[in-house]
Image: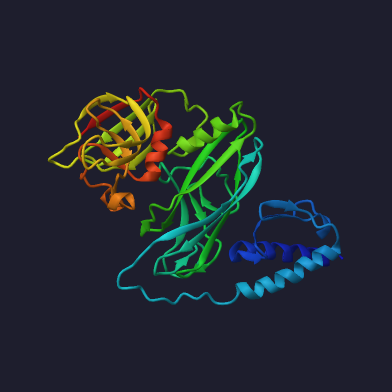
Amino acid sequence: MISKRISTILLAVVTANILIGGNVFAADKVMRAASTDVSGSESFDELNVVVDGEKTTPKSTKTAKKTTKTVKVAEAKVESKENCEFNYPDIETNTAKVVSVRRQLKVEPGERFRVKVFMQNTGNGPWFSGQSTCHGPKMYLGTDKERDHDSIFYQKDAVGWESANRILMDQMRVDPGQIASFTFWAKAGKSADVYKEYFSPVLKDIQWIDNTPITLDVIIGETGDSAGDVRNKISFSRKSGSVTDLDLNGPKTLKVNLSEQKVYAYLGDTDVREFRVSTGKPSTPTPPGKYDILIKQDVRIGAQAPHYIMPRFMMFQSSGYGFHALPSLARNGGDQFWTEARNHIGIPVSHGCVRLLPEDADWLFDFTDIGTKVEITY
């Protein structure tokens, strides 16, 4: 009987190792055996196995036998050879698209919770897991903003993490057009807080795939802020870390950099947003200097011909200069409209105003107040 129990325990340990290496899928759930505790166990009934980040104890020998059967199927799959064959394209395109992020928005202090990110490989080469034996490009999620920082949600030996700044891909290989998933467990801090964590996909020793940010917003316990204030703090945050101390009542400033063709929105000393703009062309430049927002109008019609239609207008100089969305003009008695091309954003082509994309102008219009400071520099 003792020999039989030892054999069962050894099988469970092998099971754990197989699941760790193989990332076996059951339905839509990634199952991983993170650890196996055999200390002090008198029978398999008492054997504790951590599956998908949750500790489970088999209730009976019948359950244990069912687990063993499942493992034999999984073992057969793991032993199958990896497909490592692929041809490098003449011109590599490494791009990705975020499909969805599944996570809890609110957790209790000290609570462990699961996060699952789905991402499509929109490039022209395959991705391989960091656990793959193939020599192709290894795909991870890396912590970002600041890049490669140690995550506040990381714990040693936590499921899904290779290190404090790298998360493993679940699949061993994901070809172009296919969907990859990244599943990991995180642990909330011990005190009430609001955190924002940024991640970006990264191909090891090749490149970070920029412009594909993944954000993990987590409310821990009761912070005392209203729901609206919490939403604003999360929205305004552009770096990983706690957002609790952001002063929503801080002074607002818009800083236009004419050389970069960008405007930066500040709340106190915190840079909360940036947008590409189109400022004045050389013959009609945007005047540098320090100003205030004087007037805000949903739509302004230019007083002089050709009478531009300027949505979300915010005047910062009494002579008429202001921020606004791409302008339009009426044609053929008003039956048709011409609108400035979106691809002109980033190019100085205006008559001195600061033009924005419509969606960016909407955000900036809602952010500013009469009296908001404006600084325009090269």
Examine the rendered structure and indicate whether residue 240 appears above or below residue 93.
Answer: above
Closest to the observer, 17 or 259: 259
Residue visible at 60% across and 53% down? 159
Closest to the observer, 131 or 187: 187
* x then y, percent, for residue 6: 78, 63
* x then y, percent, for residue 309: 31, 41
Closest to the observer, 183 or 373: 373
- Quadrant of the rendered image containing residue 361: top left
User: In which quadrant of the rendered image does the C terminus lie?
Assistant: top left
Residue visible at 62% across and 45% down? 104
Closest to the observer, 354 or 373: 354
* x then y, percent, for residue 139: 45, 60
User: In which quadrant of the rendered image does the N terminus lie?
Assistant: bottom right
Residue 184 shown left or right of residue 95 in the figure: right
Residue 151 shown left or right of residue 276 in the figure: right
Residue visible at 28% across and 28% down? 316
Residue 33 shown left or right of residue 137 in the figure: right
Examine the rendered structure and indicate whether residue 49 appears above or below residue 280.
Answer: below
Query: Can residue 339 be seen in the rendering of this structure?
Result: no
